[in-house]
Amino acid sequence: PQSGHAASEGATPRKDDGLRRPVSRHPHMATVHRKQLCVTLVLALAARLGFVLAYPQVPVVNDAAWYDQAAYRLASGQGEGATSFARGPIYPLFLASVYRLAGHDQTMVRVMQAMMSSLSVLLIYALGRAVFNAKVGVIASFLAACYPPFIAYPGWLLTETLSVFLLLAFV
């Protein structure tokens, strides 16, 4: 016979971490959370795409211009000087891959970053759910979907969107 408080509440072991957690008394909440998450992801994508496609974007200057030119050189096979010790190679490689597929099109980069930022919202949900519960995950993802800098960053040819996405993906 099992003993302990968790067993009396109907807990089941989870395969991923071996910890015992109570089974939900409201199985319909999983469906509610799934619907809320879907609405949140649609909101996130719509806000980001709306911003990058409808709102005039800032000019590509300073760091953004360096990333753009480095990526263009990489995409066109002129990789020399495309990376430096002052800036990492990951973002220029990302931009170069978009430029290889779509041409030197900064709008396509912004669209790709809008999609990546929306996926970050999903990763924030997953992190909140893993650390706390599904309700926390839904709330955290909604806040991230509406957070103005996360909506604006995809419009800039800078590392922020990719960095946030990769950080969340590897947590």
Image: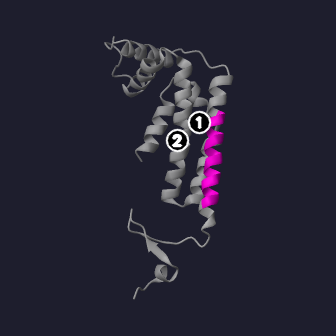
Judge the density around disc 1: few (<14), some (14-19), many (≥20) Cα neighbours within 10 Å: many
Tag 1–tag 2 contact (CB < 8 Å): yes
Q: Is residue 93 magenta?
A: no
Q: Element type at marker 2?
A: helix
Where residue 32 appears, x then y in whole percent?
64, 59
Where residue 154 appears, x then y in whole percent?
56, 29
Q: Is residue 41 magenta?
A: yes
Q: Element type at marker 1?
A: helix
Please report the residue visible at 50 percent of the width from the left and 25 percent of the height from the top.
158
Instruction: Specify the principal SS of the magenta part.
Output: helix
Real-space CA distance between mark 1 and mark 2, rounded to the nearest whole angstrom: 9 Å
> Is residue 122 positioned above or below 128 on the image?
above
| Residue underneath mark 1 | 150
Of pointers 1 and 2, the one earlier in the residue sequence: 2
Closer to us: 161 or 22: 22
Q: For the view shown, which residue lies furthest in the left direction?
A: 80
Residue 139 visible from this viewpoint: no
Q: What kind of residue is marked 1?
A: Phe
Which numbered disc, 1 or 2, marks the residue closer to the eye? Answer: 2
Please report the residue visible at 47 percent of the width from the left and 38 percent of the height from the top.
165
Where residue 18 appears, x then y in whole percent?
38, 68
Where residue 159 appears, x then y in whole percent?
47, 28
Magenta stretch, residue numbers: 31-47
Please report the residue visible at 50 percent of the width from the left and 83 percent of the height from the top.
8
| Residue underneath mark 2 | 120
Asked if residue 54 lies left or right of residue 5, the reply is right
